[in-house]
Amino acid sequence: SASFIVQVKGRVEYQRLTLATFLSLCSIKNTIKTHIHKHTNIFTGDLNFNMFQIRLLILSALVAIVASFAPPAFVSTRTISTIKDGVASSASSSLTSLDAYKKVFVAGGSKGVGRHIVDKLIEDGSEVVALVRSQEAIDELSALEGVTAILGDAFEYKNVEGAMDGCDAAITTLGQGTAGEDGKRVDYEGNSNVIEAAGILGVTRVILITSIGCGSSKEAAPPSVFEVLKDVLAAKERAENVLIKYYTNMNWTIIRPGGLKSEPGTGEAILTEDAMAIGSIHREDVAALAVKALTSSKTERKVLSAVDQSIPSASNVEGRVVDEFALA
């Protein structure tokens, strides 16, 4: 008779990774000491260097520690040994599924792309924790099986951290067309709070939804569109830079959608690494791509644009076609 032995492999070479983490901490310590040495008036009131940057450096070290000691939740590699007639054989396979992310934090889940993401996640069997700002949103989302809606404000770091605690992954779609009375924008302030909380809590899988026109895709946006949205895009880009620069041990993905539409999705939208991609896309399709990207090992530390080339777009009058990024 045949017997099956299934061995789930975790992360290997723990001692080597621990040493690498120690060296990383030493490097960060030396960086902080250098800052203090260069700014001799730090303790006399002239605080000239950016404490926020140093705090983020320390958070990077914490993420490195989590990554070193925790088995990888993102991809499980299984070795299957089969013994039949006295002969042993084995095969390995890489598995990615929402089983790895059973509890997902969603910021911006009360409307738009975020609301569609909540629906897609619960359809796929994940539990969702959504941070929302109104009692109306609490009532609506709490009526959905598998959703825990928490009242809070993404501008308040402690609200974000408290809601995210216990989650396996985080997706943020935070964005708003206008700034508050203090000039702050949730596009940066809220998203950076999500990123920082993920680092503190050891939530190493993060998806940030921003927009075409940020970073390397700036030239893709028509000048007239960029001029109107430049302040919003600048805030979103700042959040992107925090994630890319300071969270080098985090498994992040940045998705930049084109012009958003509210009609039902076509199912034809794609992700692409082409920074010059431009066009339109339905919010429902952005959500579908984000949930697929969540469990794709190929999206680790990738910046991707999202467009639907089946939709005519005034931003792409030349009909430029881009290559699709394969998630599988």
Image: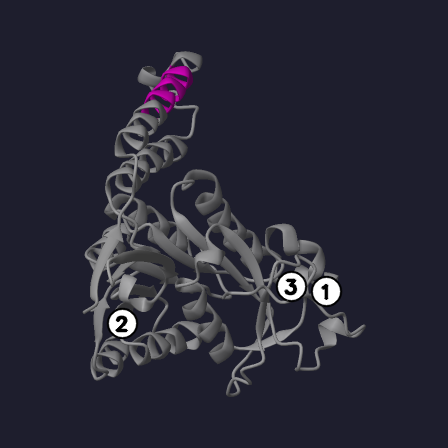
Q: Which of marks 2 and 3 is in front?
A: 2
Q: Residue at x 39, y 72 (%)?
A: 114
Q: CA–CA distance between discs 1 and 3?
A: 7 Å
For numbered disc 1, what is the local secondary structure?
A: helix
In front of the other: 139 or 16: 16
Q: Which residue is drawn at 38% across and 46% down?
A: 250
User: Tag on residue 228?
Assistant: 3
Residue 122 lies, with reference to residue 75, above or below; the image says below
Q: What residue type is labelled 1?
A: Ser
Give the residue pinned by disc 2. 126
Magenta-drawn segment: 25-36
For numbered disc 2, what is the local secondary structure?
A: loop
Q: Are marks 1 and 2 in contact (CB under 8 Å)?
A: no
Residue 216 lies, with reference to residue 269, above or below; the image says above
* Residue 27 is a magenta residue: yes
Q: Which of marks 1 and 2 is in front?
A: 2
Give the residue pinned by disc 1. 224
In front of the other: 57 or 1: 1
